[in-house]
Amino acid sequence: LASVDSTNRYAAEALTRGELSHGAVIMAQEQTAGRGQRGRTWQGATGLDLMASIVLLPERMRAVAQFTLAKAAALAVRDLVADVFRSEDLDVARIRIKWPNDILVDRHKLAGILIANEIKGEHVRSSIVGIGINVNSSTWEGVDATSLLLETRRGQDLHLLLSRLCMHMDHWWGLTGKDDAAIAAAYTDALWAKDRYTDFTLDGRRITARPLDVDDMGRLIIEEVGGEVAAYGLERLRFLM
Ligand code: BTN
């Protein structure tokens, strides 16, 4: 699409009308009301950044396992960025997944993912995986961000990137329900700040803790200074940066 308010919203409506099948991808050159996590907006630069939504129609994914989709999507984006980094001889270890599914290079956000799952009964009926990647843009206001252009000094073709992204998504999606342990292990391995003490807010109170892993519900398992280990969801726990 040349321009749309939000590819996620467009995909949701088209899905409701029965116009989209599993694997459909909506990409836009421009979003006029891009959506971000927690009700925020997402500003991708027109014609420069990748803004797309991938529609998944799981056949028998249980609602309790839905975080697997978030892991799969984050790993697909991570792998795409790793491809670009490798082609430029850059260190792929700098690319991390910040729980739940931001993609960072060092401490700077390169990509964000917004997933809308429709649950019916005990199952995930559909999933719209919205992905925004800073590709050819280089200026942001008030956010600690980076882009592929800033990291590599080279511009990228958005359609080529999208097709590679779909390839990686296809790989990780293909493992869901078959080898969830492999998805979980790869996600844990890529976790930003894993085992490193960092600042959070827990119920609004500032704490220092180190991320150890995520549990099956997608909650982050942390160890506070002092040794207490517990798992928390986004409604209680936030990274301070
Ligand atoms: C975040 O806040 O980190 C998530 C950002 C997700 C942005 C993408 S861009 C394509 C898709 N359509 C939207 O409206 N949002 C997602």
Image (cartoon, rainbow, N blue to C red):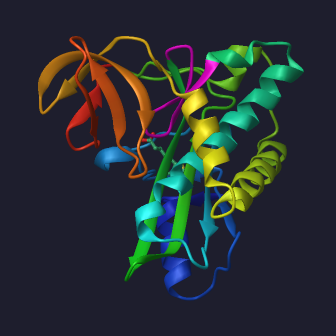
Residue in the picture at 63% in, 85% down: 19
Q: Which residues are magenta?
A: 95-107
Q: Quadrant of the C terminus?
A: top left
Q: Quadrant of the N terminus?
A: bottom right
Residue 230 image position (x, y, % from top left): 26, 33
Residue situated furthest bottom in the rendering? 18
> Can you say whether 127 is above or below 185 in the image?
below
Residue 91 image position (x, y, % from top left): 75, 12
Count of numbered circles in the view: 0
Horizontal side, residue 118 vs residue 81: left or right: left
Residue in the picture at 47% in, 39% down: 43
Decide whether the magenta segment is chiefly helix, strand or loop.
Answer: strand
Residue 155 shows up from this direction: no
> Can you say whether 222 is above or below 126 in the image?
above
Q: Nearer the viewer, residue 131 or 153?
A: 131
Horizontal side, residue 15 vs residue 172: left or right: left
Q: Nearer the viewer, residue 34 or 193?
A: 193
Horizontal side, residue 107 vs residue 205: left or right: right
- Based on the displayed image, in which of its 4 quarters is residue 143 positioned? top left
Residue 64 shows up from this direction: yes
Q: Nearer the viewer, residue 27 or 131?
A: 131
- Based on the displayed image, in which of its 4 quarters is residue 238 positioned? top left
- Based on the displayed image, in which of its 4 quarters is residue 215 positioned? top left
Residue in the picture at 35% in, 43% down: 219
Q: Nearer the viewer, residue 209 or 158?
A: 209
Residue 46 image position (x, y, % from top left): 61, 42
The reply to whether the magenta stretch includes residue 125 is: no
The reply to whether the magenta stretch includes residue 100 is: yes
> Can you say whether 107 is above or below 84 in the image?
above
Residue 82 image position (x, y, % from top left): 75, 28
Residue in the picture at 71% in, 69% down: 23
